[in-house]
Image (cartoon, rainbow, N blue to C red):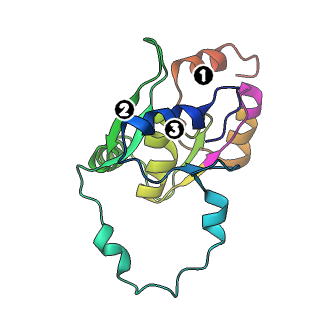
Amino acid sequence: FRAADKFDYVGMVNDIKQNHPYLQILLTVEGRAPGWQAIDDLAEQAIETEYPQDYLTQFRPRPDDICVEQLSGGTTGLPKGIPRTYHDYIGNWDYVGRATGLTDETITLGAMPVAHNAAGLMVWGMMMFRGGTAVITRCTQPQDQFALIEKWRITFIPLVPVQLNNWMGAREL
């Protein structure tokens, strides 16, 4: 986990793991923790020649398998893990993409945290599934986002309500 705040995400997951022994592989991004595997270390391993080409087919997930535990925003108290299945994501990417007319020529702006559920459903996930381009930014100011829209010729922008309010209050709108 990458934490911009002081919350101990690794500690939280370690506590959860004590009651859920099936959690066997824990990954860190931009850092290391005892008992966890760093993504950076995995990316540096050249394993392509160690296994036959069809090796991964034995691990193919079923549509109802849990793909990820999405952390809720905690608006009703402590954040909770929301189990998201493969068919949940793929169904959203397919149906919402068709309903909004997204194509492989769509260029979308992801101006929200990439781990946010809306970003997974409407930005990076949908663009990977539908073949478009996702422009992802850390910029939070409307003026910076407007500049990206112009630079990248953005054609689709999912916004959460607070972002829309910020945009509506921007002088350059």
Q: CA distance from mark 3 to mark 1?
A: 33 Å
Q: Dividing the picture into quarters, in which one does residue 138 lie?
A: top right
Q: Is residue 173 left or right of residue 79?
A: right
Q: Which residues are magenta?
A: 135-144
Name which residue type carries label 3.
Asn
Please determine whether, in this image, residue 129 is positioned above or below residue 161. below
Whether pointer 3 and pointer 2 mark residues with C-beta atoms closer than 8 Å, the reply is no
Q: Dividing the picture into quarters, in which one does residue 62 lie?
A: bottom left
Within 10 Å of disc 1 (Cα), the crowding (few <14, some 14-19, many 20+) is some
Query: Front-most of 52 and 36?
Result: 36
Q: CA distance from mark 3 to mark 2?
A: 18 Å
Query: Front-most of 7 and 153?
Result: 7
Name which residue type carries label 1.
Gln
Q: Give the residue at x 46% y 49%.
A: 125
Please determine whether, in this image, residue 106 is positioned above or below residue 109. below
- Among the two numbered marks 1 and 2 on one chain, the one whose residue lies closer to the N terminus: 2
Does the magenta-highlighted stretch encompass residue 20? no
Determine the secondary structure under disc 3.
helix
Q: Which residue is mark 3?
A: 14
**Could you say where residue 149 lies in the image, as x and y percent from the top left?**
68, 40
Name the image quarter holding the C terminus.
Answer: top right
**Could you say where residue 147 lies in the image, as x and y percent from the top left?**
76, 37
Q: Which residue is mark 1?
A: 163
Please determine whether, in this image, residue 78 is positioned above or below residue 56. above
